[in-house]
Image: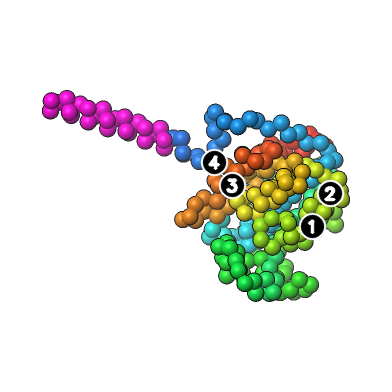
Amino acid sequence: MFSTGITIARVFIVLTAFILASFAMAVDDPYAEPAEPGLPPSNMELDFPRVALLVTDPQIDFLSEKGATWGLVGASVTHNKTVPNIERLFKAAKKAGILVVISPHYYYPTDHGWKFEGALEKVMHNIGMFDRVSSWSMEGFENSGADFMPQYKTYILDGKTVIASPHKVYGPEQNDVVLQLRKQKIDQVILAGMSANLCVESHLRELLEMGFEVAVVKDATAAAQIPEGDGYLAALINFRFIANAVWTTDEAVARISAAH
């Protein structure tokens, strides 16, 4: 009995080790696409000129090491190569001649007088994220956290890119993104920017509800990783569930080029 007990114990240990090793391999890259997806594949095809590139919050506070949120999002931005990937999308869109729309995030002094805030709103306001001196003055804007990333300015400030009014929480309900898209007869959107589980996902949900066809570029975004959870993984799961397509930057650039 004693030897049998030892044998059973050894088998149990070996099986446990195997299971744990298999699990470790499976979660080695938690962002990898599943080997056997449970959802049907996308059939979204771009139809030029119905297409626009929409980039949320391509700003210093989100994407630069000097930005206010780098300690929260920096690891994800670096892992995804978010900064160069967004620039690749800008280049492809400009070369193809498709509309580019920016949905920025700004806070003015009056916004700091809000009587209630969500958890992330509290964080953003406390660290001075996206702060501007007023809604009408550009004083102190250049190279501030609210400014666009320097490498993007050649694309954004070319006189052709639509810079929408600021969204105030996460989604485009409070700005003119949808109006700008509709006025250009756009109904297909390639969506990228910051941050994945907040502004990107909120724009995705609202645009879908408004009848747009939306592809999210999963490595041209990123999110905070905090004790409460991995924001990027949370968003990626929802992208797979609800977006019309989820592409890499390589896939998006190839499709933009082909559409042209």
CA gap between label 2 and label 1 equals: 10 Å
Q: Earlier in the sequence, mark 3 or mark 2?
A: 2
- What residue do we see at 41% from left, 35% from top? 23
Report x, y in % for residue 20: 37, 35
CA gap between label 1 and label 4 equals: 33 Å
- What residue do we see at 83% from left, 53% from top? 180
Q: Is residue 70 left or right of residue 156?
A: left
Q: Which residue is mark 1?
A: 176
Where are the magenta residues, as a range?
Answer: 1-24
Q: Amino acid at mark 2?
A: Arg
Q: Earlier in the sequence, mark 1 or mark 4?
A: 4
Q: Amino acid at mark 4?
A: Tyr
Q: Secondary structure at mark 3?
A: helix
Q: Which residue is mark 3?
A: 235
Q: Which residue is mark 2?
A: 182
Give the label, 3 or 4, closer to the camera.
Answer: 3
Q: Secondary structure at mark 4?
A: loop
Q: Amino acid at mark 1?
A: Asp
Q: Earlier in the sequence, mark 4 or mark 2?
A: 4
Q: Amino acid at mark 3?
A: Ala
Position of residue 36 relative to residue 211, above or below, is above
Q: Secondary structure at mark 1?
A: loop
**Dot label at residue 31:** 4
Report x, y in % for residue 185: 86, 45
CA gap between label 3 and label 4 equals: 10 Å
Give the label, 1 or 4, closer to the camera.
Answer: 1
- The answer to whether residue 74 is seen in the rendering is no
In which quarter of the view is residue 128 placed? bottom right
